[in-house]
Image (spheres, rainbow, N blue to C red):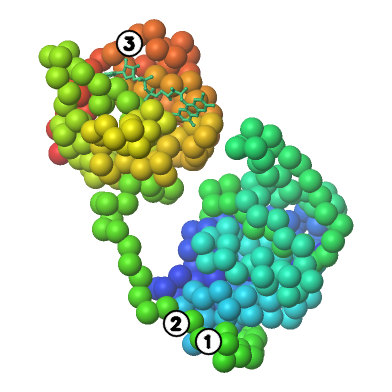
Amino acid sequence: MKILALLHTQESGSLPKAALEILTAAVALKEQTGGTLAVGIIGQGAATAADTIAGCGAESFLAVSAEAVAQPRYATDAAATAALIKESGAELVVAPGTARFARCLPGAAYRAGAQIDTHVASIKAEGEKIQAQRWFYRQRILVTFSRTARPWVIMADAGVNTPWQGASGAAGAQEVAVSFSDTDLRTNVTGTRAPAADAQTIKPDAALLFVAGAGWTKKQKDGQFHIAEAGTLIQDFLLKAAASLGSSKSLVDLQSEGQETLNFMTHMNQVGQTGSTPRHAKGLATCCHGEEPHTVGWRFINERRAVNLDPNCGWAQGKADVLYVGDAFEVMAKVNAMLS
Ligand SMILES: Cc1cc2nc3c(=O)[nH]c(=O)nc-3n(C[C@H](O)[C@H](O)[C@H](O)COP(=O)(O)OP(=O)(O)OC[C@H]3O[C@@H](n4cnc5c(N)ncnc54)[C@H](O)[C@@H]3O)c2cc1C
């Protein structure tokens, strides 16, 4: 079995965490299949990046570090990755499911005559039999499957493998020449526009997911709404704890109903059956009662805690590891003060 770990560098020239994660899977597959491993890297500083993973046990390192792939661009990335797949002669290609590869690898797979599967959560081999797993239907059905088609390109989600760690050295990466057409070079990335770091509330790599429920926007014990205060408390906490922000559906739906609500919250933050199911080490739910965010939205959160005024809310009945029965306004003000 010829295996290719297909990676890309990031702007700094180093390999992103997701690339090191898939390398762990590739090294394991090499052992399980008794096959050979090649590593192919595209992007700025690809050959130097190969040196940082020289000790991974790969038989060969291939690189495309041409100026054309210094910027992430579909046409040049698809041409470069297709060239690496063909050059390596790989039967199995594993790659990280980064935004850059999610754009170009389906096209590259087509050009290389390969089949591709995305969002794979696990890859294992018994001899030459490769088995992959991925979730379907909003992460409620876990399917184990295999393909006979070769080459087979598998893109794994971030966070499902531990990042590879090992010795660096001289990898002696072989530069693969790719002939880019004028059309490939037609699109030019002129810059990146991104929100300020503290404006970005969805942070998949954060250790903690903070979930806000509609309770933050309800009348409080003084009979008044305290939405501005809720916003300040939540944003202050997100900043101090570098936490990612999730929301119940009720809270994000308020906006479309024209009610005053937390203006930094969008449907992208919603967790649950009809929202996302993020993976974080810890979770803290506040003012949140819903079944869906807790049972479905939080299914991949390892340690779960909740703050709710109501001891009889669904959380109190065993969905959280710890339930604090208390006023989230007071609790979070105190937590923020402690974090200061
Ligand atoms: C088909 C379907 C799909 C759905 N999908 C989703 C989904 O993906 N995600 C989702 O979230 N929901 C989903 N829902 C909706 C879900 O059933 C709940 O209605 C919703 O999650 C409730 O949101 P909530 O807990 O924020 O609000 P509420 O139910 O209004 O709960 C507010 C909570 O805040 C507490 N509270 C108020 N003030 C304070 C305070 N000061 N301190 C502490 N606690 C306080 C209250 O005690 C209460 O428990 C779905 C529903 C259906 C029918």
Left or right, 165 with reference to 220: right
Q: Which residue is mark 2?
A: 188
- Asked which secondary structure carries label 2, the reply is loop
Can the viewer see residue 25 in this picture? Answer: no
| Front residue of this view, candidates 245 and 94 | 245
Q: Are there few (<14), some (14-19), or many (20+) residues within 10 Å of tag 3? A: some
In the rendered image, residue 276, in percent from the top left (x then y), is placed at 50, 39
Q: Can you tell which of label 3 and label 1 is closer to the viewer?
A: 1
Left or right? Give the position of 42 relative to 329. Answer: right
Residue pushed farthest front?
258
> Mark 2 is on which residue type?
Asn
Amino acid carrying label 3: it is Asp
Between circles 3 and 2, the one closer to the viewer is: 2
Q: Position of residue 215 (x, y in %)?
A: 29, 22
Please say if 169 is above or below 67: above
Q: Quadrant of residue 339?
A: top left
Q: Label 1 sits on what residue type? A: Leu
Some atom of ligand 1 lies within 8 Å of the CB belonging to the residue at label 3: yes
Vertical comparison of 18 with 286: above or below? below
User: What residue would you read off at disc 1?
Assistant: 185
Mark found first going from the N terminus, 3 or 2: 2
Residue that label 3 marks: 310
